[in-house]
Amino acid sequence: MAAEKPTNWMMKGQIVISCNCDYGCPCNVNGRPTTGDCEGGWTWHIEQGSHGDMRLDGLNIGLYADWPAAIHEGNGVATYLIDARADEPQRAVLQTLLEGVAGGPWAIFRKTFRELHGPRFVRYEVDEQTQLPRVTANGAVSVEMEFILNPVTKETIHPRVVLPEGLVVKEAALVATKRFTVNDDHVKYDHSGRAEPRSRAGGEGEIRTLDGPVTHNGFRDRRLQPLGHLSETVCNGGPDRIRTGVLGLDRAACLARLHHGTDGG
């Protein structure tokens, strides 16, 4: 009996990342979390997306966790959120993605959790049109960002991080979190006013957008906008079957490369 052909899926959009580390987040360069543990997560705003013939445009999803040490050391407790506007078929597809069944970065994150709770369906309010996007997920998550200031001149600065081997993004703007709270039965913290590594670090917020046109390395700078740009994510079913021309890489590396679009889709 022939194996069932996995379903192709694609996402383009913006990622807001927040955590409890200092600016730049040591985790980005394989360092230890600033405070010893990692508390943070991601909100994906899907500007364009599909799973097979099903469109996912305009929906939002989130994954937030609490790890007792570095992420790669595991034992994390996580919860995931799905946009309440999604219909039943869309909810099923997004659940498959967030639980790591269809590959992508979620399959790797799943290996670091001892508990994954959800889905929790929430009403999202995402303002992605500004240089400082805001995210509100119906009392579950609230992220409001502000620019990092030079401590001497008090002028706004616009640092960026470049991660050629990054799992979720290759390049991102760094900002600070004016407000960052997660309120769930299983994951709960308040890191308002903290910095964010990649704009994620402990309270930092990280902003990235995935939009075209996509250049060879998957990035395009937009003038006067402190956002990182990524190419589309394309995955062909589960983690064992990904459409990629990258050779000589282990599965995790292939997934990371694919997620960042370095194979050109």
Image (cartoon, rainbow, N blue to C red):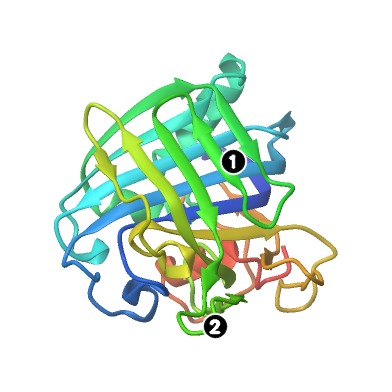
Q: In terms of depth relative to the viewer, which is nearer, 154 or 248?
A: 154
Give the secondary structure at mark 1: loop
Relative to 205, 213 lies left or right = right
Q: Which residue is mark 2?
A: 153
Relative to 229, 257 lies left or right = left
Question: Would residue 102 be seen by someone viewing this image from the given angle?
Answer: no
Give the secondary structure at mark 2: loop
Q: What residue is rendered at 67% in x and 71% in y? A: 263
Q: Nearer the viewer, mark 2 or mark 1?
A: 2
The picture places residue 7, in percent across and down from the top left corner, at 61, 40
Q: Which residue is mark 1?
A: 5
Distance from disc 2 to disc 1, alpha carbons, whole Å, reads 58 Å
| Number of other residues with Cα within 10 Å of mark 2, as a class: few under 14, some 14 to 19, many 20 or more | few
| Number of other residues with Cα within 10 Å of mark 1, as a class: few under 14, some 14 to 19, many 20 or more | few
In the rendered image, which quarter is residue 156 located in?
bottom right
Relative to 189, 22 lies left or right = right
The picture places residue 6, in percent across and down from the top left corner, at 57, 42
The picture places residue 178, in percent across and down from the top left corner, at 45, 52
The picture places residue 195, in percent across and down from the top left corner, at 39, 65
Looking at the image, the residue that sits furthest to the right is 213
C-beta proximity under 8 Å, tags 2 and 1: no
Q: In terms of depth relative to the viewer, which is nearer, 158 or 262?
A: 158
239 up-or-down from 63: above or below: below
- From the image, which quarter does the C terminus lie in? bottom right
Q: What residue is rendered at 50% in x and 66% in y? A: 256
Residue 148 marker: none
